[in-house]
Image (cartoon, grey):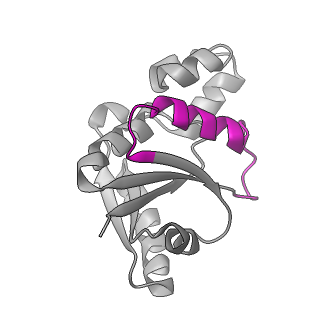
């Protein structure tokens, strides 16, 4: 049995904190699918296709990491790709409280899918896509928070 894991999020943009979670989860799974969820409630800065392209470029030499765009319930997408695991990164206690609520709902929807939490490296706890987008919007240098591929592509980063 392949241990397939879905790492869902908006990744708008993918940050070094996200990369940290993906890289540290690699020994745990045979494949990690970085799922770019379409969320109508959020107004993304970057198109889903741009985010997909960046993830594919960053992990072009790692065949165990794939990227995809999906819509709808995360547990339904897990079923579609054969994943029994959802990966989530935790920076602070408040993240855990929010993520546990989602994990509980997902477990109610499908008891065969387990959520795995990894805590972020302390050096990345302040890295959040929301903050990075604010830095970019206001002309600041977001490059300390971004993988090189994205920093080169984003004006002012």
Residue 67 to residue 3: above or below: above
Q: Position of residue 111 (x, y in %)?
A: 40, 85
Q: Position of residue 46 (x, y in %)?
A: 71, 36
Task: Judge whether residue 100 can be spotted in this image.
Answer: yes
> In the image, which residues are magenta?
39-65
* Image quadrant where residue 3 sits: bottom left
Whether 53 is among the magenta residues is yes
Pick whichever, 1 or 76, lies toward us: 1
Task: Count numbered badges in the picture.
Answer: 0
Residue lying at 44% horizontally and 64% vertically, measured from the top left: 99
Q: Is residue 25 left or right of residue 9?
A: left
Task: Judge whether residue 142 can be spotted in this image.
Answer: no
Residue lying at 76% horizontally and 47% vertically, measured from the top left: 43
Q: Position of residue 144 (x, y in %)?
A: 46, 19
Whether 55 is among the magenta residues is yes
Q: Is residue 43 left or right of residue 35?
A: right
Q: Position of residue 115 (x, y in %)?
A: 37, 68
The image quadrant where one finds the C terminus is top right
Residue 157 to residue 129: above or below: above
* Image quadrant where residue 96 sits: bottom left
The image quadrant where one finds the N terminus is bottom left
* Image quadrant where residue 2 sits: bottom left
Residue lying at 47% horizontally and 53% vertically, measured from the top left: 33
Pick whichever, 69 or 19, lies toward us: 69
Residue 144 to residue 131: above or below: above
Residue lying at 40% horizontally and 31% vertically, measured from the top left: 61
Q: List the single residue furthest toward the left.
A: 27
């Amino acid at each position: 049995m392949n241990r397939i894991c879905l790492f869902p999020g908006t990744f708008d943009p993918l940050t070094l904190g996200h990369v940290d979670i993906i890289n540290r989860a690699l020994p745990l799974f045979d494949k990690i699918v970085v799922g770019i969820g379409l969320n109508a409630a959020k107004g993304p800065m970057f198109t889903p296709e741009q985010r997909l392209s960046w993830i594919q470029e960053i992990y072009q030499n790692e065949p165990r990491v794939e990227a995809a765009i999906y819509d709808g319930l995360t547990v339904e997408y897990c079923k579609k790709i054969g994943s029994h695991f959802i990966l989530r990164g935790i920076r602070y206690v408040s993240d855990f409280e929010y993520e546990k609520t989602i994990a509980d709902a997902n477990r109610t929807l499908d008891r065969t899918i387990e959520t795995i939490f990894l805590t972020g490296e302390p050096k990345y706890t302040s890295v959040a896509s929301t903050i990075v987008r604010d830095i970019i919007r206001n002309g600041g240098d977001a490059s300390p928070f971004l993988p090189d591929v994205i920093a080169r592509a984003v004006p002012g980063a």
